[in-house]
Image: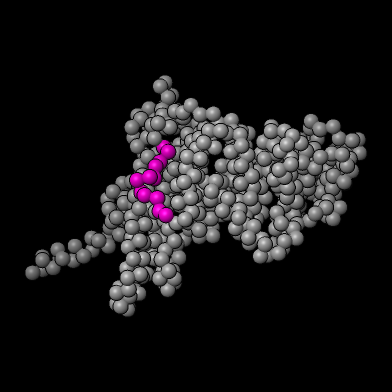
Amino acid sequence: MNMLCRRKIIPGQQSLLCHNVSLKNKVRYFSRLQQQWNMIQGSNSSPPPIQPQPLPMQRFAPARKIDTSKWYFLMGIAALFTVGSGLYYSSGNEVLKDYAYTSKVSEYLKEAVWLEGNKSNSNYSEALKYYILALNEMPSNVHKLSDSYTRIELKIAEMLEKLNMFDKSKDIYYEILNRFYMTLSDKSNMDGQIKVNERAELIRKDLRILIKSLELNQDIELGKQNLLAHLLLTQEEILMKSPELKEFFDKKKERTQNLLMGQSMQLEEFETFVNEDNIKVDTEDSGLLVLNMDKNSSGWEPFKEELFVARDLYTAYCLSSKDITSAISCKMTTVEWMVMADMPPGQILLAQANLGSLFYLQAEKLEADIDHINRKAQEDPSLLEDDNIIKALRILNKNKRNCLTMTGKCYDSVLDLFNKNKKLRYHMKDQLDTSIPQAIALSTYGKAITSLHDGLLPKAEGLLKDAMKLAKESDFKELLGEATRELERVESLRIKQQEPQEQVASAHTTV
């Protein structure tokens, strides 16, 4: 593969962006990236009420591990990776389409396509050989970011995947991504060497390849770093193209600086973006949802779909590394930006519901910390005489209440839209966007879980049954499975509650 990769990058040994940089410099580099990311998120650079806990908290080990894996279905990870695959892979014949290759390159490509496409006897190793020959036969004047060049590289990566040579396939993705990043981050290229529309298309390709590459990535931190670097490039591009968005950030600059200094935002400042000002049901009888806004979303084109898939993947990576705070921060900004970018209403609804689920997950974590400190205090009552411990408990309880409040706001905003619009309810099965019924099902399920948390078993039972019905209608299999398990749990808890009452009644009868 040396004849293919001129600057080979080994995952885990070399950074995607920094080739010959010491580990200490890499840490500083990605620390600066994180600071830039926080600044560009606007007012949502960190979730309002969730601040780092006081130092005494470090005296206690975590009470119990919060299983974030059970929440992956809420983030739609399977769908995201499916989108990532579909964004880039195409049939072998399309490698030949629309490009004027030399006769030798065309000959090699035709042979590779035939070997790959022979369904009765696909020979991926031989196809790989001819794709490599075609790439090495490409004239030196062909730009290495052009479709004609990168499509052959991507076919090589695809063949390597089919041969289970995943590490070598990752090397190719990282090589291509490095090339895109270096070009797009080079400020000199902004002076006319790359036209604005060309930059936008390059960013779109960059994000597509990034999303696809993450299917093979097993290093969570590396995945987060790569996503962070490429997302910052995209977001800087949007700020340059959209005066409206730049004005939006300028207005919130002071609030952002306060947040970065650790000052908490008040709960009243939290707002949901699913409301009648942003989304409405159309005036006709179709019952379809439409955005009720007059926004210029050209600054997000043509890469907005890829951008929001990548942002959701970043949220998922934060969740994988148990960094719930960063997951919430990213998701809050994502929901707000989706409205500004004129994304489909169903996707906005689902994003808002997912944000509610993340807030609930954070509330669970805070509750576990509180329970653990209380157990330690039972073993050593003197702890409750420590002012720092008392302060820590007060902050934890306040943050938990705030998280549960914001959880309810997120779910209620989706359900209120559903309940207030009869046309939407009557035409639920007619919705072309499956995100709409899935968001409503997820919000109903979320309200059931919060009711269960409050001990309201009859209410939780009714909501879970509604969620199961909605999940079946929208083919939301992951949610249906979770709701079924929670309903079994509710029934088990109800039986346990009834047993003492039956024993008391039996005792009275005996007397």
Q: Give the range drawn in magenta.
A: 263-274
Residue 58 shows up from this direction = yes
* Coordinates of residue 431 in the picture (x, y in percent): 47, 31
- The residue lying at 33 percent from left, 60 percent from top is 397
Q: In which quarter of the image is residue 421?
A: top left
Is residue 419 shown left or right of residue 156? left
Q: In this view, does 294 lie above or below 482?
A: above
Is residue 268 in the magenta section?
yes
Residue 6 rendering spot, x and y as whole percentages = 83, 52
Examine the structure image and report whether residue 433 is included in the region drawn in magenta. Answer: no
Instruction: State the residue at coordinates (27%, 53%).
Output: 456
**Residue located farthest toward the right when viewing the structure as drawn:** 104
Say whether residue 109 is left or right of residue 245: right
Q: Where is residue 165 in the image (x, y as percent from the top left)?
A: 75, 56
* Residue 77 seen from this side: no
Nearer to the camera, 482 or 157 = 157
- The x and y percentages for residue 490 are 32, 55
